[in-house]
Amino acid sequence: MISSTSEIILSIEDLHASVEDQEILHGVNLIVKEGEIHAIMGRNGSGKSTLSKVIAGHPSYKVLSGSIQFKGKDILELEPEERARIGIFLGFQYPVEIPGVSNLEFLRVATNSRRKELLKSELDTFEFEDLVNERLKIVEMDPGFLERSVNEGFSGGEKKRNEILQMALLEPVISILDETDSGLDIDALRIVASGINRLSQPNSATILITHYQRLLNEITPDFVHIMADGKIIKTGNRELAIDLEKSGYDFLDKTTKEKEVTK
Amino acid sequence: MTQTNTVEEIVSQPYKYGFITEIETEKIPKGLNEDVIRLISAKKNEPEFLLKFRLRAYEQWLKMKEPNWSNLTYSKVDYQDLVYYAAPKQDIKKKSLDEVDPKLLDTFEKLGIPLSEQKRLSNVAVDAVFDSVSIATTYKEKLAEHGVIFCSISEAINEYPDLIEKYMGTVVPINDNFFAALNSAVFSDGSFVYIPKGVECPMELSSYFRINSGDTGQFERTLIIAEESSSVSYLEGCTAPMFDTNTLHAAVVELVALDNASIKYSTVQNWYAGNEEGVGGIYNFVTKRGECRGKKSKISWSQVETGSAITWKYPSCVLQGDNSIGEFYSIALTNNCQKADTGTKMIHIGKNTKSKIVSKGISAGQSKNSYRGLVSIGPNAEGSRNYSQCDSMLIGDKASANTYPYIQSKQPQSNIEHEASTCRISEDQLFYLQSRGIDFEESVSMLVSGFCSDVFNELPMEFASEADKLLALKLEGSVG
């Protein structure tokens, strides 16, 4: 699937970013091409979630320097909704509850905003119901979820499945899934992982942000990156995740120390 | 630009209904005295009892002081500088719509209330009130087939004086409060509804109030009577042109529900709110009260209040009949310099009476939005229950929200529950919606609609989406 001629979807160069005047990202570099699955691992506070929010355009995070390009175009000036419409999807670690707003209506408005960008016709309520019922199967969700308020009273696993349902409807070019596996039991993890696998396309890409390697047993990444202190400090393949699992994050300390020594 | 600033910009959108209809108007000179009241009464050809009613009210009003206990501050109204009667020049009595001045029909059509036979709303009868007079009422004949009377109050005074004499002023006495007394003295027009025993009103009834003159006070009076085992759903809408002076609107609405009767009264209030600096706009001082006189009767108020510079309004229920039910569902949106002090009173008198209050206040800009409510359980109201929920949403950091719940219970065998919350539009919720491709404005209005959904569910079907759109419109806007 991956070849050197594959188009670059996302290109991040020397990215520095802060939140509440505190610099969290200290120069991140990352290139993601079509068809690739990347995993970003690292300890709490290493900057993984910050990176995902900066890519999606969260207003609290400020880019200090560096660049993010999507298909060769600078996206830093784009509003979050514009980034979403061109095909950048962020699966939230903690999906937000929106009381009183029907999940069905929310999904329909979101889907139509993406379809508009793709020059597809907008779907009315009936057409959308057909589509959503078909996509529900991917995440094995009950149609009853559509009638409820967005994420309100959903269990952790239901919220994550609702995220993958959104991904299925929006058909993004790049999906950044922030700790989608956290808080899931084995069954939910399998459903979510198989959903992600089914949705990956040769012309799209996925970034999995995760703490544990167990998600990577279900979804095989092409690249594994380790983040620490706001930087990607090591890049490897699937083996790296397995090593990490075996020896824990301590082994990183060793390697960084070694680096410092050799410097 | 910070996120908050942008939200504020979005909630400030131009008022769509601010146009003035150029039409010849007959006005009486400014000022208020006994002669003015006699003149109004004579113009309307009223029977003696009503003139006396007005004069008694005027006498009371002279002795009363303008209330100042609310959380509202506004420039003093000069009651001698107002016109108390203004009417478009035409015969008030029109046999058919064809004879109504086309300019007036156009005005209402522009407001989204087409009146002509071909275009009128299906299944909604409309009474259209322009300044001081009702200009047309649709579907009168169809309603008459069911014995339902729906007409202007002026017409009812002449055609059904017995009903007027029997009921007017019995729910809101002439000396109830300063503004009610003023209204009782000078009221001009409004709607009258009578539902006979056992009749379920076959269609939605609606009144549309339009203020057109700048210096004219509008004092409308509405009376709805639901006889035993009858039911009706009624909706009122209000708009006004933009003037840089303040226009006074002091209405009185009285509802009477007899045994097993039910009245649902909904309001979508969108009077001109003044400009961003708070210049102009309507002073909306309204007394609305319903009496559940009969056993198992029910009165339900729902209101969407988005307009007016000042709103002072407490639609209330007097739960006299045993097992009667009172409800109040409210959305009040204030922006810029608007001030609203609104809520309800639930007066439990009969046994096993129940009331429910759901209030949603949204304040943006520098506006002030207060909920003020009274739940009173009398000594004989054993087994009575109340549930109140008051939620406030703040947009930006200059707006304020207050809740003043008053609870009085003289009956140990009763149950009162009160919940209140205040929230801000959360950045995380906004970002979540935006990150799904929904633009900022739509995200804000989605969050506000979600916040108000409990109340939307109570509005008549035909108007729920209308009200939702109105809120979205208020929140939408200037961008582009």
Image: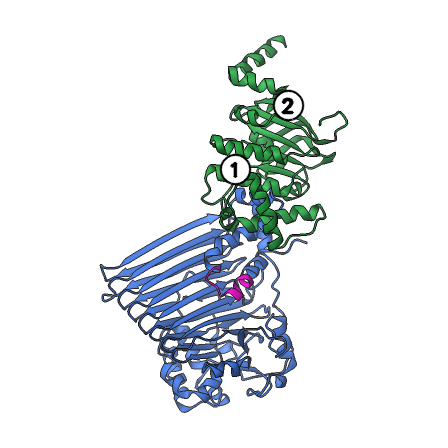
Task: Check disc 1 and report its element: helix, strand or loop.
Answer: helix
Chain A: drawing colour: green
**Spot occupied by residue B432 in the image (x, y as percentages of width and height):** 56, 42
At horizontal 40% and vertical 63% (from top left) the residue drawn is: B328
The residue stretch that appears in magenta: B457-467
User: Front-most of A232 and B59?
Assistant: A232
Residue B441 visible: no
Q: Amino acid at mark 2?
A: Phe
Q: Is residue B256 above or below residue A149?
A: below
Please identify the quadrant where the N terminus of chain B is shown.
top right
Q: Is residue B451 above or below residue A51?
A: below
At horizontal 51% and vertical 66% (from top left) the residue drawn is: B268
Q: Amino acid at mark 1?
A: Lys
**Spot occupied by residue A233 in the image (x, y as percentages of width and height):** 61, 19
CB under 8 Å between callouts 2 and 1? no
**Residue linked to disc 2:** A223
**Spot occupied by residue A209 in the image (x, y as percentages of width and height):** 57, 29
Marked residue nearer the N-terminal end (2 or 1): 1
